[in-house]
Amino acid sequence: MRRAARFLFALLMGLAVLGTLGNLVLARTTRAWFEHDLTLRSQLAVASANKSLAESWSDSIKLTEVLDDMTRDERIMGAAACSPSQRRLASTKGFPAEFSCQSVLGQMAAEGSSRSYWSTTVDLPAGPVHVSVTATSDALGTVVLVHDLSFLGRRETTTRNILLIGFLVISLGISAVTLLGARFAWKGWTLALRRALSGESQGEFQPLLRDVRSLVDRLAREREGEARGGAWSAARLKATLSQHLQGERVVILANREPYVHEKDGAGGVKVLHPASGLVTALEPVMRACSGVWVAHGSGSADRQVVDAKDRVKVPPGEESYSVRRVWLSPEEEQGYYYGFSNEGLWPLCHLAHNRPVFRAEDWSHYKAVNQKFADAVCEEVDSDDPIVLVQDYHFALAPSMIRQRLPRATILSFFHIPWPNSERFGICPWREELIAGMLGSSILGFHTQQHCNNFIDSVDAFMESRIDRERNAVVQGGRATLVRAYPISIEWPVRWLADAPSIAECRSSVRKELGLAPDALLGVGIDRLDYTKGIEERLRAVDELLTRHPEFRGKFTFVQLAAPSRTKIVMYQELNERVEKVAAEVNAKWASGDYRPVVLLRAHHEPPTVFRYCRAAELCYVSSLHDGMNLVAKEFVAAHEDELGVLILSQFTGAARDLTEALIVNPYDLHQASDALATALRMPEAEQRERMQSMRRLVSEFNVYRWAGRMLVDAAELRRRERMTGRFSHS
Ligand code: F6P
């Protein structure tokens, strides 16, 4: 309403200005028109009376009569006949006393007029008059006619009033029409929007609104869930599983087992926790949900501890779920694991500049081993519609193999590594088979939306299928695979931190272990020895730091915990040598006395040691050249209960999308990376705290229970829909 009033006011003001200007123009124009008109009339009057005037010119009485005739026109006030010597020969009664032949002809002469006609306008007290002098045709003299112009004022006023009223009426009409139009348009638009929002309309807003509605629903559900269930935890995940999926257990299929039994060399068996992001994330989920984890039995003592069905209860001492071990021959392991998975798919999916190697025999093993694991999964399920979580690139074919045997299974597949763009993926000789295998999944998860998009593009490029971009799904044979981003995380709270030594103890014990001064500045890197992790670039950045920031020489040490990985592969053996060489070079350049800038610990480290090093360090540098997520970054954040410490994180990790308060760097840019190291070492505690608090909040909230919970809730929704569809299509 206020807007309408403002609009009306502005309109009226505009009209007033326009009216005033118009009035002025109008007055001038009408006066000019009338004067011109009177001039013509005067000339006409004298011309038509010319004959009578000539006949009576010398007879003043007759002449007066002729003049009287001429003044019959109501607007002529008076007339006078003047001799060439400016003497009045005759005049009518109404001829104004203000004028005489002398005064009028004198003014005419003063203006230098030599024409036979002259006129002027004079304002008398009674009103304006038009005075004209017209010479008679045979030059006897002149006739002066005085026209009343006061009518002109009246006429001007009347005309002005009529025009003004008309103008006002038109303006008000236009305003009213404009306002009504605007109002109806707004009303119509809002009505349309309201109708669209309420679902009545079938118009062009529908796809957008469906997205908005589903987003709002989802957020509302999450909020509601958050309010009811509190933060995501093991207990809430378990409740979600039984509430939403009426399930008590899940079956996980992953190549790497969560607990590896190794001979300890003294006739005993030790249990190891493998260095694997996948295990870090999924083990807590499995403990919360219970069920079976189907994996490759890779430990030297694995066979010793399993039962007749190749199962072993874990975690040791807790025994809340089972590991079902699948045994592979050396040839199978070579072809499926080292060959196709890690010499083919791994370099194919990571932008780390190593060529993938595709061997037909590796592919045969990959297919056969996928079938072997799929069969093992089918043996472990306890219903015909189980929930199966298929993990990672080792098992791209397993989802469709499981689906063949268990068509009603809910299969949630998750790729822990990036998915390349379709052009890159297209170089794989078995690209169609791989995608077809993955499309056996009900839901296919990646860490980032970018990887989802890349996958969908690959489907688009190489498969016959329908892509439902609204639902982010691929539909084949009437069955949909949802493709979604679920950024993975770690458990919160981290169980290894429950009994961890204090941060002060970690700081001093680690420095002692490494032979460093108690006040030495420490940076840490924790990885499998893999060429995707950018370990060489990381050590070169340390070199650059000491070159460009001399204040840290002799004071800063970077310790790299590097777990040997995939050591049968030549590329990994070469990497191992290169990393060792770079570490030696940097040390040779900057070491002095007891001081070493780089400490390379090439060994498997159990989680308590990993967390002790994280807690001891001032900074952690994750320099991956390409990484699906990188959970070490999140573990470093979890380790720092003191809210101190700085994370330096490669922009090419999935984690960089979550942990934006880290110092984000391009690991190839050694200047930038070394400056980030310097910035971290100089960062005031207040700033460290601010960044760390924010990252800890994020990791605690977006923990791995939430990751699994969201996938399970989405799976439940899908199951519900499929059951409904099945019910309707059977009825
Ligand atoms: O994080 C990616 C990943 O391939 C995991 O899936 C895997 O468990 C981890 O790296 C370690 O690799 P590997 O199991 O080959 O030792």
Image (tube, helix red, strand yellow):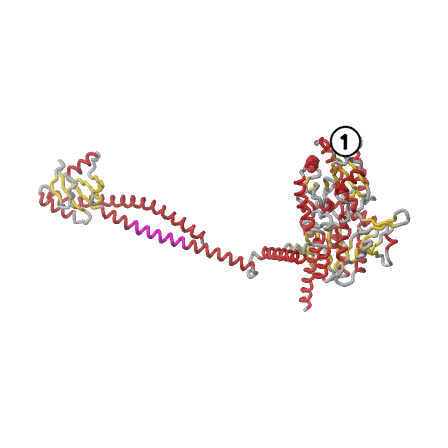
Residue 521, position in %: x, y?
74, 36
Q: How many marks?
A: 1
Quarter location, residue 436: bottom right
Quadrant for the N terminus in the image: bottom left
Question: Would you say residue 28 sits in the magenta stretch?
Answer: no
- Within-10-Å neighbours for mark 1: few <14, some 14–19, many 20+: some
Residue 449, position in %: x, y?
67, 50
Q: Which residues are magenta?
A: 159-176
Residue 693, position in %: x, y?
67, 45
- Please state if 296 lies on the left or on the right of 701 as rendered: right
Quadrant for the C terminus in the image: bottom right
Name the residue beneath numbered marker 1: 590
Amino acid type of disc 1? Trp
For the point 81% across and 58% down, the residue is: 375
Quarter location, residue 63: top left
Please tell me whether the stretch drawn in magenta is mainly helix, strand or loop.
Answer: helix
For the point 71% across and 59% down, the residue is: 239
* Foreground residue among 154 and 84: 154
Q: Element type at marker 1?
A: helix
* Foreground residue among 266 and 658: 266
- Please state if 106 lies on the left or on the right of 467 as rendered: left
- Please state if 86 lies on the left or on the right of 295 as rendered: left
